[in-house]
Amino acid sequence: MRMKRMAAVAAVAGLAVAMAACGGDSDEGGSGTGASGIVGKAESQNKLVIGVKADQPGLGLQTGSQYEGFDIEIAKIIAKGLGVEESGIEWKTTVSANREPFIEQGTVDLVVATYTINDERKQKVNFAGPYYVAGQDLLVKSDSTLTGPDQLAGKTVCSVTGSTPAKRITENYPDAKLQQFDAYSKCLPLLENGQVDAVTTDDIILAGYAAQDQYAGKFKVVGSTFSDEPYGIGLKKDDTTGCEKVNEILTAAAEDGSYKAAWDATLGKSGTAAPELDTTKLTHCGAV
């Protein structure tokens, strides 16, 4: 009997040692919390790879090795909230077509790139936010009397071939004259010299163009949106903890003024007032 008790004690002791060893392995990387996803990576490595656009003035614009714009400032706020300083951010240029693949494959940890939350994308990735709800709008000359899409009959509107904004003009405002190019930037000189009456796409993108130095004071965003485009922060579909943490950071940014400061330093230069970040509309991060 005594021998049996000794064997049992030895077995328990052995199990305890094994469990301690397993616990050490789970803390590899130094976070000490066992957290996974973006929270775990930020804690253990103090680094994040963030996907952003590189060709959208005021939002995500690359000049040399530097990125600037509202999306970039939002990304910095999130990284800081996760404990990662700017020096720990690796910017990765994304385009619309590779955002989901980049997240799924781990090429990036987050995407902050005028990334509209929709049901199709939510099948592949998780979304925090929205940090801004964009909408299709019109960019016009500062002295224009256009106040909305219902006044476009007989007017020339510039947009991008194959884009949703161009399609919406064709379907909903057939009396407008639609002129299309392969990039919105090609519409701006035409608007400046009066060859087109308006340029149309998401309001936040239009505000970015209007904020460019060469167009300062020349254009205005009408401010009469006719669609909803909630911009979210994409991350891996199973990273619920990371999503909830990002939403906490956005809520804090709305309260402490850093969200407004990010706007004022970028898109606010167009003269467009900072929007209110409605934290009651933040996602549930995939929770049912």
Image: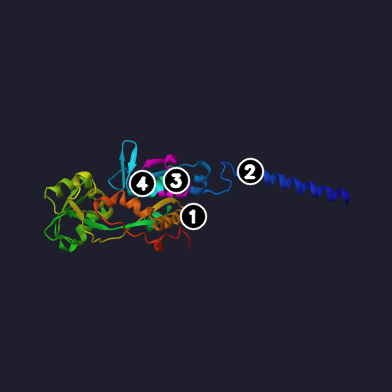
Q: CA distance from mark 2 to mark 4?
A: 37 Å
Q: Is residue 94 above or below residue 256?
A: above
Image quadrant assignment for residue 283: bottom left
Q: Secondary structure at mark 3?
A: loop
**Label 2 packing within 10 angstroms: few (<14), some (14-19), many (20+):** few
Give the residue pinned by disc 2.
Answer: 24
Q: Nearer the viewer, mark 4 or mark 3?
A: 4
**Part of the protein shown in magenta:** 77-95
Residue at image x 22%, y 47%?
Answer: 184
Which one is earlier in the sequence, the residue at label 3 or at label 2? 2
Confirm or deny contact between disc 1 and disc 4 (CB under 8 A): no
**Magenta run includes residue 279:** no
Residue 277's x, y, as percent?
A: 36, 59
Image quadrant assignment for residue 134: bottom left
Residue 173's x, y, as percent?
A: 18, 61
Give the residue pinned by disc 4.
Answer: 72
